[in-house]
């Protein structure tokens, strides 16, 4: 059988770029807020959504959006609504 190489030092290319950012959130609540932002960014990437366009639209609509329709502003729902409105 062949041998599997063992790497003692982690390869920085394999680590998420935000790995060390968790050390500097300032508090537990800051860490939770950072996790929400990172989740939104990752979800936008997953759905091929331009993050700047998404955030600009959502932040503009958020103050007047009813709380019971907040799910409409989630990235996957926002993309569906945005795609149908641009047709």
Image (cartoon, rainbow, N blue to C red):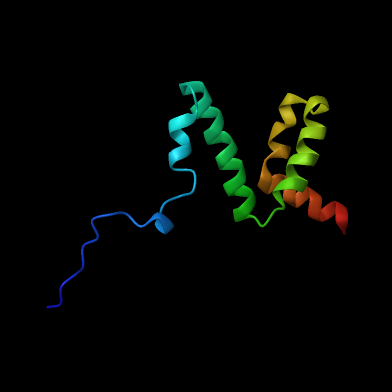
Question: Residue drawn at (62%, 53%), measured in percent from left and top?
Answer: 45
Q: Front-most of 46 and 87? A: 46
Q: Is residue 63 above or below residue 57?
A: above
Left or right: residue 49 versus residue 35 is right
Residue 38 image point, x, y percent: 56, 41
Identify whether 65 is placed above or below 79.
above
**Which is more toward the observer, 66 or 5?**
5
In the picture, measured across the screen, residue 4 lies left or right of residue 37, that is left
Question: Measuring 72% from the left and 38% from the top, which residue is drawn there?
Answer: 73
Residue 87 % position (x, y): 87, 59
33 or 22, which is in the foreground? 22
Q: Is residue 38 left or right of residue 77?
A: left
Residue 21 percent across, percent down from the top left: 48, 37
Q: What residue is shown at x 86% (from left), y 52% (from top)?
A: 85
Q: Relative to 69, is 28 on the left or the right?
A: left
- What is the x, y in percent for residue 11? 35, 57
Q: Residue furthest left?
A: 1
Of residue 10 and residue 62, the one placed in the foreground of this image is 10
- Tell me the quadrant of the picture where the N terminus can be found: bottom left
């Amino acid at each position: 059988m062949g041998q599997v190489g063992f790497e003692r030092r982690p390869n920085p290319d394999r680590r998420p770029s935000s790995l060390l950012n968790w050390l500097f959130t300032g508090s537990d609540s800051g860490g939770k807020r950072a996790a929400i932002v990172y989740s939104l960014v990752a979800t936008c990437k997953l759905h091929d959504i331009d993050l700047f366009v998404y955030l600009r639209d959502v932040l503009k609509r958020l103050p007047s959006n009813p709380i019971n329709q907040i799910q409409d502003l989630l990235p996957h729902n926002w993309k569906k609504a945005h795609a149908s409105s641009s047709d």
